[in-house]
Image: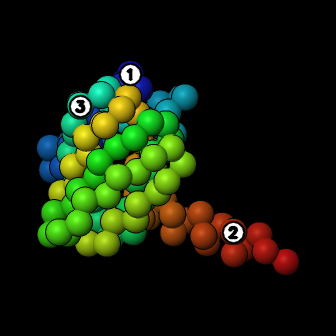
Amino acid sequence: MSPVRWVVERLRPPRERSQGGAAPRGVSAAPQLPLRNNEATSFRARPGCEITCERGVVLVTQEGDPDDHVLETGETLQVSKSGRVAAMALRDCRLRVRAASSLAREIRRGLRSSP
């Protein structure tokens, strides 16, 4: 499976995904989403999911949240409740979306390796 197809599959609701398995070589478990100026995307997210703007500027809005959030390079938004998240590039940008479960694994690994 190509890296692009793998990212697209991860954005689909679980019941619509094909049985793709692990990320292909060169693709992290936290997919990067490049967006061009004025391009938009949306996906479902759970509490604790982190959306990081790695480059550019993006407008992020979350279902049930009356506030919109503008993220610039290096800024992160943590999703507060389950629902749909929409992102629109205000300038060409690249987002990284990390699921809450991957964050929990990193924290557990860090706790185990602490002296």
65 and 108: which one is in front?
65
Residue projecting furthest to the right: 115
Q: Amino acid at mark 3?
A: Asn
Q: Quadrant of residue 44?
A: bottom left
The quadrant the C terminus occupies is bottom right
Q: Is residue 53 above or below residue 5?
A: below
Which residue is depicted at the point 17% across and 69% down? 66
State left or right for residue 44 relative to residue 10.
Answer: left
The image quadrant of residue 101 is bottom left
* Residue 34, horizontal then vertical, whole percent: 38, 30
Image coloring type = rainbow
Mark 1 → mark 2, Cα distance in angstroms = 31 Å
Judged from the image, the secondary structure of the residue bearing numbered disc 3 is loop
Rendered image: mark on residue 64: none
Q: Decide if residue 17 is in sight here.
A: yes
- What residue is shown with label 1? 2
Instruction: Report how far apart the C-alphas of labels 1 and 3 lie in the structure.
Output: 26 Å
Q: Amino acid at mark 1?
A: Ser
Residue wearing tag 2: 110
Query: Upstream in the sequence, badge 1 or badge 2?
Result: 1
